[in-house]
Amino acid sequence: MAPCGIGKKFIAELLGTFFLVFFGTGSAVITLMISESVNPNNVGIGILGGLGDWIAIALAFGLTVMVCIYLFGRISGAHLNPAVTVGLLVSKNISLADSVYYIVAQVIGACCGSLALVLCLGMPSVVVGGLGATAPGMGVSYLQTIFAEFIGTFFLVLVIMGVAVDKKATPNFAGLSIGFTVTAVIIFLGPFTGGSINPARTFAPYLMDYLVGGINLWVYFPIYLMGPIAGAIAAALLYTYLAKDNDVCEIPGPFN
């Protein structure tokens, strides 16, 4: 079977990242808007049910990722995340030229997702919901947030390498495994980093908030660039090392 051309991959990555941002950050926006209607003086994710709010938001992200992997995985691999693409680049699973197309598509798709939220929900999505922009929680330092985003993305890309990239992976479980990994990471990271693990997911709300008169959060963007990309690179290189020559290794236990 002939591989898909880069144009089709570009469209798949754009659409997949659009859906991720629209439904994922949209769930955060809706949560904040509902919270504001319940208690205008105490707005924030968690007001309606503590960790339950973050579980709902994490599921929106994770389920969208899962569906997009099954939908677009055979076309582009469904990276949906510049950090994932960089990790696959350094581990030589994607070419430099293709990775540039992927990242451009992801950023455009994410920005279109944020813009669509504004068009659907109006200015309250910006003024109240901040378009689901990520920022460190109260009392969480810059470096702590970078490290947390590093760990979250490290885990995500390690799972991707093991269940999707590795040719020995069990087929048909990648979407489920990766989707629930995203869910678990966001449930944990959400309250104190916003649970980005994806530079495009953070870039789009920052840009659209800035363009339409919302809050300016650009001072935090290096967090969500450095942490996820460093985590993705470390995970991809580590898994490549662990899996190298694995065919000649004796693997004890029930999973060999």
Image (cartoon, rainbow, N blue to C red):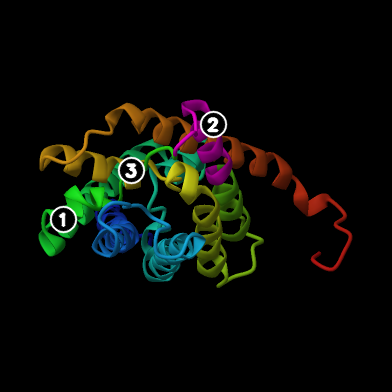
Q: Earlier in the sequence, mark 1 or mark 3?
A: 1
Relative depth, front residue between 169 and 215: 215
**Amino acid on which the number 1 mark rests in the picture:** Pro
In the image, is residue 3 part of the stretch drawn in magenta?
A: no
Q: Which mark is residue 202?
A: 3
Q: Quadrant of residue 217?
A: top left
**Residue 170 position within the rendered picture, expressed as x and y whole percent measured from the top left:** 64, 68
Instruction: Give the distance between the C-alpha atoms of the residues marked 2 and 1, in whole angstroms.
Output: 30 Å
For marks 2 and 3, give the one nearer the viewer: 2
Relative depth, front residue between 207 and 122: 122
* Prevailing SS of the magenta stretch: helix
Q: Is residue 167 left or right of residue 232?
A: right
**Amino acid on which the number 2 mark rests in the picture:** Gln
Q: Residues within 10 Å of mark 2 (few under 14, many from 20)?
A: some
Q: Quadrant of residue 45?
A: bottom left
Residue under numbered circle 1: 124
For marks 2 and 1, give the one nearer the viewer: 1
**Amino acid on which the number 3 mark rests in the picture:** Thr
Magenta range is 138-153
